[in-house]
Amino acid sequence: ANEGYVRRVQTWFSSVAWESLVDGSLLAIPPAITAALAPHVWDCVCLSRQLRVKGKIQMRNRKNEPMDVDIEFLDNDEWEHGSLKHYRNSADSSRDLTQMSFGPDVAKLAAPLLLANTFLLSLKIGNGREPVKVDIAEARAATEINLSAKELCPTDAIVLSHLLTSCSALTRLDLRGNNIGDEGERELAATIMAPTRSMPALTCLNGLKASDIMEATELEELEEEGFDFRKRHVSSLSASEAAFLSRFVGQNTRLVSLGGLSLKEGATKWNLKSRMVEWQTKHAAVAFVLSRAGRCPTLLDIYLRENNLGLGGGALLAEWLPNLGNLQTLDLYNNNLGAEGSGALALQLKHLTTLQRLQLSCNQMGVEGCAVLGMALRTTPQLTKLFLSNNDVGDLGSTAIAAALSHVQGLRVFQLSSNAIGSAGAVALSHALSSLHSLKEISLSRNLIGAEGGAALAQVMQHTLSLNTLDLGYNQIAEPGCWYFARSVTVLSQLKQLCLEENGIKSDWEAARALYKAAGEYNKNCWIRF
């Protein structure tokens, strides 16, 4: 059971499989991993150590340079990062975080332990000649924190993000003039956008004032405090600044335009395809759109396709979805939501009781995202169209979806193309699809379905008499599978299109001729493609 767990987490976080690590390969913690998820990687490494696995783990130093450490030596007390208990149990009253070995990977793991250490009173951060001393108690009670131009790096920002979660009195925070990078910005944004609302009193970040956001009716630029006549366009804000902006955009009921993004009141449909793609970060734009949507009772359809919303945008969407009770269409095609973003979104679908069309294709959902969506679909019996193509779901993900389809009896269109689904996944789907008597269209093209899976799907045709389109092009069904379709097509008077092209079936083969003959006798309107 442990080995199976490690294999799953390992392939989620890294391209190195468990078996490769056993052989002595290198495990790297990708920079995109958030501080919230980094402990899972560490658990994987610790289990590897317990099982006496040989190999290396790569952890970046303060300059973002790789440090390769043998897994078998992680218990060595001379390497202080080998045991994270060192950070939680140390009796030191001050901790110097400017040492080269304390990089962003270690910071993600150690920061919560450091700040939970009751002996620790202060931290030293910064890359300058003189480190910046941060008194932890003073910071937690402060109303203003100014750390501008202190040569802070991503590692410092990660640690500060954890500290700021307990700064409930803070009203002003200034981190301008540092080099905290995308990684540091991402952690600060996550802190600002946390559901528990860290820093609830914050009204000024990097010179940007909440009052300017709350008083505007049309907002293109924000004046930056401390600079005469200097203004920042809202679409060019950093991730943390956009997260700050999104807090107050949702509260401003008078705002009608944000960064050139205007929404028509009283409309039934908003088509915002690629409208936010040029924004440096999407937090503020998403908050603006969804807060307006929640106050627009006539709105039925939202199209946000191809905006590259990412994990942060997906999480923000999930936060606002409960307010969109009238929504019938939600189109999020090609937004790079990932497993986490799509999973967070799926958990809120239960609030969309009128949702009929859900488009989540091209979002890198993976097995994990499909597992969460599978559970969520049990709460959406009203759904009529579901699009999940190109999400790398495989057999496991398609099986998770299949387990929930019996709860969506009104489903008419189902697309799961380009997902590396083999015959095992096709068999699981066939059992579920055969119980959906309203299905009009099924698309499973560009997968890895063989003759066995094709035979199972052919059986679906005999139970789903309403079916008019079945697309299985670019699979591996071959001639043995084709025979099953020749038998099934005789009972489908409604079938208009059957696509079996690029399946290793030649139109002059016996099975193909049998299929043509059956269609000609029982359904002359059916178009068959090989």
Image (cartoon, rainbow, N blue to C red):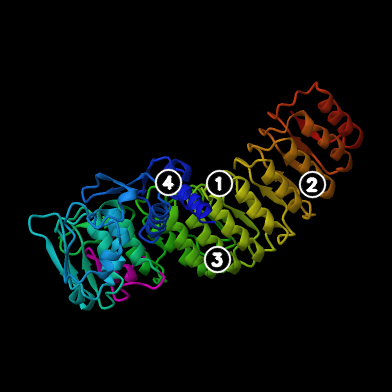
From the image, tell me which residue sits under label 2. 460
Quadrant assignment, res 257: bottom left
Label 1 sits on a secondary structure element that is loop
In front of the other: label 3 or label 4?
A: 4
From the image, tell me which residue sits under label 3. 348
In front of the other: label 3 or label 1?
A: 1
- Report the magenta residues as a range: 195-222
Which amino acid type is shown beneath numbered disc 4? Ser
Work out how far the residue at label 1 is from the one at label 2, CA to CA, in angstroms.
23 Å
Which amino acid type is shown beneath numbered disc 1? Asn
> What residue sits 70% from the left and 57% below the top?
405
Say the numbered circle drawn on residue 14. 4
Work out how far the residue at label 3 is from the one at label 4, CA to CA, in angstroms.
28 Å
Mark 1 vs mark 2: which is more N-terminal?
A: 1
Which amino acid type is shown beneath numbered disc 2? Val
In front of the other: label 1 or label 4?
A: 4
Q: Are the residues flagged by discs 3 and 1 in contact, CB closer than 8 Å?
A: no
Crowding at mark 2 (Cα within 10 Å: few <14, some 14-19, many 20+): many
Residue 203 belongs to magenta span: yes
Q: Is residue 440 left or right of residue 45?
A: right
Work out how far the residue at label 3 is from the one at label 1, CA to CA, in angstroms.
20 Å
